[in-house]
Image (cartoon, coloured by chain):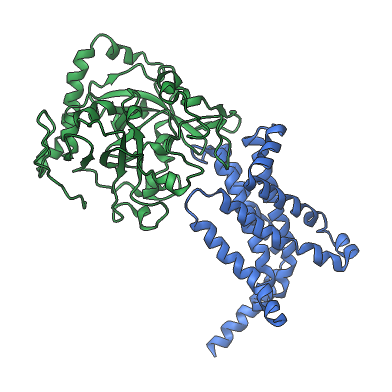
Chain colours: A green, B blue
């Protein structure tokens, strides 16, 4: 791992998250425990309500798909009634060009990827910047499970039970200032570990971003797991973004940097094809990709006879997010 | 000495092989293997999480591979002096057309579910689909005139007509290039192969002319 840990002593996070210097082996081995403990604490607050409700979630996939890497996980009502994509399909059909451009490449090439220790650098328009060890960030996270629809720009889709925590809760702890209009994320650049980066298929490192009000929407989620298991490497371990009303490529994986900015951040796919992949990239059946229709989508796991599903505006999350784009021409700001 | 023996053995093999009665059926069955692979994969659910895409793309890939194999026959025949190869050109060409047909029909069936309005819209709206469709249309007269009877009837024009395969090969590859999101490695490799096959035919002619 070639991450340089930058310690910013001028802006220490006083409450909770501290910019750490070196992670001892025992500390990072304990990360999973931290996650589980925070789950227990948070779970206690919800007892009676949703924990019991979780058992009755109708959307359970085959039980073999489920793991229990996270104990006492809060089950949320998100995605109730959705039928889940199988664990196998969701973890063997991936776009993660850092590990190759074929759909099976990430599952094949990411197995040796080292995600512990892991740190995230926070920069830009915020009071608490610096480099933080992932376990310090996770220490204060309320782990919950949310079932979200996931719609790829390539017109396929899946339904995944993510494990993670609210993006807004995390961002608030870095205390963004009034100049912070956008937040930018960056994926690890490490061609030794990520063989796909040896060729300049995309403008590495992968970057993407959100407008601040989008990022603060309660739907935005930082995922560290799926199907009750730790996030598989091919799905963006150890930590990735999930923004369910946007096309999949906005859900940046293996995040090492978060930057608060005043101006619209550079997004990798937008640079690659400005006419095809906009900054917003909200799921929209009425605005086609120049080369294919976005009106329908193919569910992963669907057989030959199953018709394609109609794509919903904002991937069906319009009620929660449509207000963010009112008075905006969605064909112009696609 | 050894080298000459080896060479003569190879020469003998080269001549005996095509004479064997089972040779042509074997080649025919080999050409059907990709088709069998996708059909059995579809039945046994082994085409992955997105089987429709795997099948449509797979048939498309093989259509282009057969076009390339077909274009290899004449140069290989001249370079290695294997005359009997020419007997397989028609079969390979028809297999290319076969894979184009099942590529196009699996798009009509499993991607559009026979919605004619949508298919027409798709062809008009999306250049890469339009180009694929045009290459399909251009291959139809070639397949229809592939019989001995048609060959005799068309005489010189038969050769002229079948030169259509050159623009078709270019359009087909263009169709592939236009579908790619970011990684052009595979179509670039195919472009190198196609360029050498077409270059072998046209560069000497161009040099003579100048």
Residue toward you, A30 or A262: A262
Hey, which residue is sitting farthest top in the picture? A48
User: Where does residue A98 sit, x and y in percent of width and height?
Assistant: 36, 49
Snapshot quadrant of residue B38: top right
Instruction: Please say if A60 is above or below A333.
Output: above
Hey, which residue is sitting farthest bottom in the picture? B1
Judge left or right: residue A196 versus residue B181: left
Q: Residue at x 85, y 63 (%)?
A: B151
Residue A66 visible here: no
Q: Residue at x 58, y 48 (%)?
A: B58
Instruction: Please say if A175 is above or below B152.
Output: above
User: Where does residue B55 sit, x and y in percent of width and height?
Assistant: 58, 43
User: Where does residue B24 sit, x and y in percent of width and height?
Assistant: 71, 62
Residue toward you, A312 or A278: A278
Residue A260 visible here: yes
Instruction: Please say if A154 is above or below A53.
Output: below
Residue toward you, A155 or A122: A122
User: Where does residue A66 sit, x and y in percent of width and height?
Assistant: 34, 27
């Amino acid at each position: 791992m070639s991450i340089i840990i930058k310690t910013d002593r001028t802006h220490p996070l006083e409450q909770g998250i501290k910019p750490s210097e070196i992670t001892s082996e025992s500390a990072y081995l304990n990360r999973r425990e931290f996650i589980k403990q925070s789950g227990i604490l948070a779970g206690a607050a919800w007892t009676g309500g949703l924990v019991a409700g979780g058992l009755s979630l109708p959307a359970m996939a085959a039980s073999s798909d489920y793991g229990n890497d996270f104990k006492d996980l809060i089950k949320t009502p998100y995605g109730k009634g959705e039928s889940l994509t199988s664990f196998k399909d969701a973890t063997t059909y991936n776009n993660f060009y850092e590990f190759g451009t074929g759909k099976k490449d990430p599952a094949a090439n990411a197995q040796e990827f080292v995600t512990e220790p892991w740190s995230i650098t926070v920069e830009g328009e915020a009071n608490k910047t610096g480099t933080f060890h992932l376990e310090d960030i996770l220490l204060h996270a309320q782990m919950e499970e949310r079932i979200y629809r996931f719609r790829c720009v390539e017109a396929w889709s899946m339904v995944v039970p993510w494990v993670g925590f609210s993006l807004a809760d995390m961002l608030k702890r870095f205390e963004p200032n009034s100049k912070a209009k956008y937040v930018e994320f960056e994926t690890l650049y490490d061609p030794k570990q990520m063989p796909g980066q040896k060729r300049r298929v995309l403008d590495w490192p992968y970057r993407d971003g959100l407008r601040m009000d989008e990022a603060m929407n309660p739907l935005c989620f930082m995922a560290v797991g799926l199907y009750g298991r730790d996030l598989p490497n091919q799905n963006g371990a150890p930590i990735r973004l999930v923004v369910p009303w946007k096309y999949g490529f906005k859900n940046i994986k293996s995040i090492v940097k978060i930057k608060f900015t005043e101006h619209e951040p550079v997004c990798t796919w937008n640079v690659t094809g400005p006419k095809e992949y906009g900054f917003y990239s909200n799921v929209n059946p009425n605005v086609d990709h120049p080369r294919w229709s976005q009106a329908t989508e193919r569910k992963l796991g669907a057989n030959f006879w199953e018709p394609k599903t109609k794509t919903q505006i904002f991937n069906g999350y319009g009620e929660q997010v449509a207000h963010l784009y009112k008075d905006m021409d969605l064909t112009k700001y696609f | 000495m050894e080298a000459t023996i080896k060479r003569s053995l190879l020469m003998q093999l080269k001549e005996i092989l095509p004479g064997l009665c089972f040779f042509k059926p074997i080649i025919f069955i080999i050409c059907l293997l990709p088709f069998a692979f996708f059909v059995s994969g579809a039945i046994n659910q082994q085409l992955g999480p997105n089987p429709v895409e795997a099948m449509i793309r797979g048939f498309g890939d093989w259509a282009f591979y057969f076009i390339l194999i077909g274009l290899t026959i004449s140069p290989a025949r001249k370079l290695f002096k294997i005359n009997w190869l020419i007997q397989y050109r028609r079969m390979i060409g028809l297999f290319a057309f076969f894979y184009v047909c099942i590529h196009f029909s699996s798009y009509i069936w499993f991607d559009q579910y026979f919605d004619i309005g949508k298919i027409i819209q798709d062809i008009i709206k999306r250049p890469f689909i339009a180009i694929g469709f045009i290459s399909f249309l251009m291959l139809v007269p070639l397949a229809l005139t592939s019989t001995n009877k048609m060959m005799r009837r068309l005489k010189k024009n038969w050769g002229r007509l079948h030169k259509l395969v050159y623009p078709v090969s270019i359009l087909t590859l263009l169709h592939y290039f236009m579908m790619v999101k970011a990684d052009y490695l595979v179509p670039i490799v195919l472009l190198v192969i196609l360029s050498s096959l077409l270059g072998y035919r046209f560069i000497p002619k161009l040099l003579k002319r100048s």
